[in-house]
Each structure stands twice: as C-alpha cells, then as structure tokens.
Amino acid sequence: MSSDKRSAARVTEIVELMRPERPRKLPESLTAAAMDGDLERMQLFLDQGADIEQRSLFASPLGAACSRGQLESVRWLIAHGALLDPSDAQTSPIESALGKMNCEVAALLLDAGLPIEKAAWGVIAGASVGRLDVILWLLGRGVELDRSYPRLGVLRERALATAVKEGKGDIARFLRGEVDPGPSPSAPPRPRVRQDRPLAAAIDRPRLLAEALELVRAAGKAAGRWNATGPSAPPQRMSLIAHAAGNGVAEVVVALRDAGAALNFENDGTPPPLHQAALEAQLDVVRILLERGALPNGNDGKTWPPLEAAVMSGDPEVVRTLLEAGANPKGKAASGGPLTARARGTYAAEIRAMLEQAIASTSAGKRRKKQ
C-alpha cells in the first residue's frame, strides 16, 4: 500500500472515530428513536401524538428496542404503557429480544409481568446458536423443557431437533440428559458479540484531529483526491471530504477543501459533501460548505439534491439554511415526486410548511417580474 493510501485510510478511520456521540440526523419515527436509545426524541414523538404501538415494517417501538438491546428504551416504553405482547405483532417483543440473545431485555419484560411461557421460544433460539447459558437461565426463570407450548410443541423435542440440525453437540447432550451443566445463572447472560462501532473518547479527540490534519497537509494536493478507504470506510463509495462532512468533522472538511477537494462534481455514483452533510444534519458543516462554494442545488438541480437530503434529515434548520442559500423548493426528489413527500419525523409538518411557503414566495416573485 502506498503512503498516500495509508494516509487516506488513517484519516478515514479518524473521521469515523470522531463522529458525534449521538447522530444529528433526527429519527423518522418513534420506532427509529427507540432503536437508537434516544429517550429525549422518543418523548418528543409522544408529546406530538405518536402512537406508542405504531408499526414499522417489522415491529412496534418496543419490539424494535428489544431487538436492538436498548435497555433504557425498553424501560421507558414499558413505563409509558407499551404492550408487552401485542396480539398483532409478527414477532413478539420477547422473541425479538431472545432472537438476539438480549436476555437483560427479556428479563425486563418478564419482571414487568409477561408470562414466562412467552419466553419458551428462547430455548430453541439458544439451541440454534449454542447458548447453553441462555437455556439454563430461561429454565431458572420457569420455562419447562417437558411441557408442550403453543406453536412449539414439546419444548425439549423441538430444541433437541434444532441443536442436532445446527451441530450444537453440547446442547444436544444436555437436552438428552447426558450431562449436568450445574445451576442456572442468576443474572441474565449477555450477547457475546456487540456490533457497536468504536467511538473516540473526548480526551483523545484533539490528538486524533491533529494527526488527521497533519496527514492531510503533508499529502498536499493529493489529499484533495482522496476517497474514504480502508476498514473504516462506509459501504457506499465516497470521497473523503464527503465522509468527513457527513460525520461533522469540520476541520478535516476545511483541510481537504484547502488541498483542492471538489465540492461540486459530476454524478459518478458518489454523494457530494453538501448532500452528505445535509443528510446527516451537520448544520455547521453545511454552512461551511456553502460559504466555500458548494452549490445549494448541486451541479444540475437533479443529482444528489442537497435540499432533499436536508428534508430527509428531519432537521428544519438544515432545510432553512439551504433555502436561504438559494436551494430550489420546487425541485423533485431523486425518486420522483415533490420534496414535501420526503418529510419525516417530529418536524415533518414544519418542514412541509417551510417548503410550501418557499414555493409560494418563488411563484409570487416570478409573477411580479412578469408584470
């Protein structure tokens, strides 16, 4: 790997490490806020009339929080009256929790009054992934192996068949009664694998930022052509300046721009920095990019429109900033239809009203010019 590629990969990693602790992009629904563990925004949705039992594509807010292992969201939703076992859910909240081995979440549901038989499926889930500790914990909570449960049949037989199919020999031997694993754990077992993305501690951020800026300056004009690369790069191909813009690392954005990074470029399948900053509601970076020459409508007003990204961010201040900079409120969304149809979240009505007012003002201005 060349020196430039190593430097680009390291700056990409630093940008990822220095992203905000809490996303600035606002969740589009109560379910999304619950999955993020964002209690403040969950309360905001509820205050504005959101249904605590609203359904996303797959779950209620409680089910989604259980699947994600968001303990505080689960506590908050239970305290605010969420149904522990909604009759119309495709997957119940406790099944969502135990499917991911989130036993601490399952314990909250059981402690809140959910009948223990609702947790029986967790034994089969534990057998499938080889989690004997989870099975033992559920047995300690009162699940019975030799009982027949609705939709499951006799639990021992079903779990044994699953363990054999998945090659989990230790589970199969236990279910056959060939080994004594000892007492059940009193504390809920935790998931073995966490998918959390690393995040730099506050004390480390000044050092990391200084390192990133030094690498950019040392590379000179070459840094202006860097793409986000390496293990920390986003799945979508992206310029490094757009990656920094979306993560709100303004100093790196400025340094890359000073090195010659393009702010407005032809559609090559990658998002420009202004679009990415607007999508992630990085208001300060949006303002910096506009001041330094980013076009509020993009190159052609159709490809990667920044205003559509701002509307999708759910943040009215980002929308207002782009409109004041000259973004076209009558532009179409990339997927077709008006921008107002893309508004989501707690401020959707405010964003739609803002766009409609801007459209009316634009139309009135055109009429005055004709007169």
Image (cartoon, helix red, strand yellow):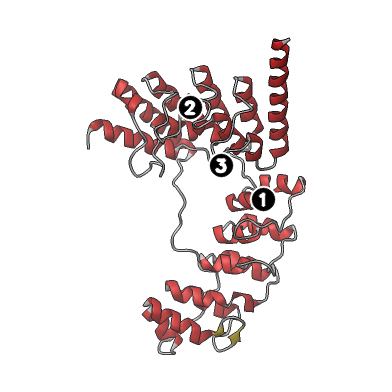
Residue 267's place in the image compared with 35, above or below, is above
Residue 317's place in the image compared with 143, above or below, is above
Q: Nearer the viewer, residue 197 or 245?
A: 245
Q: Position of residue 39 (x, y in %)?
A: 66, 48
From the image, tell me which residue sits under label 3: 22
Q: Quadrant of residue 13?
A: top left
Q: Nearer the viewer, residue 177 or 290?
A: 290
From the image, tell me which residue sits under label 2: 250
Q: Callout 3: helix, strand or loop?
A: loop
Q: Position of residue 349 (x, y in %)?
A: 73, 37
Q: Callout 2: helix, strand or loop?
A: helix
Q: Residues within 10 Å of mark 1 (few under 14, many from 20)?
A: many
Q: Report if residue 181 is visible in the image.
A: no
Compared across the picture, whether 156 is left or right of 11 comes to: right
**Gap between marks 3 and 2 measured at Cα:** 16 Å
Q: Quadrant of residue 259?
A: top left
Type of residue at label 1? Leu
From the image, tell me which residue sits under label 1: 30
Q: Nearer the viewer, residue 44 or 193?
A: 44
Q: Callout 1: helix, strand or loop?
A: helix
Type of residue at label 3? Arg
Compared across the picture, whether 19 is left or right of 320 comes to: left
**Gap between marks 3 and 1 measured at Cα:** 16 Å
Type of residue at label 2? Ala
Q: Earlier in the sequence, mark 1 or mark 2?
A: 1
Camera-near label (1 vs 2) is: 1
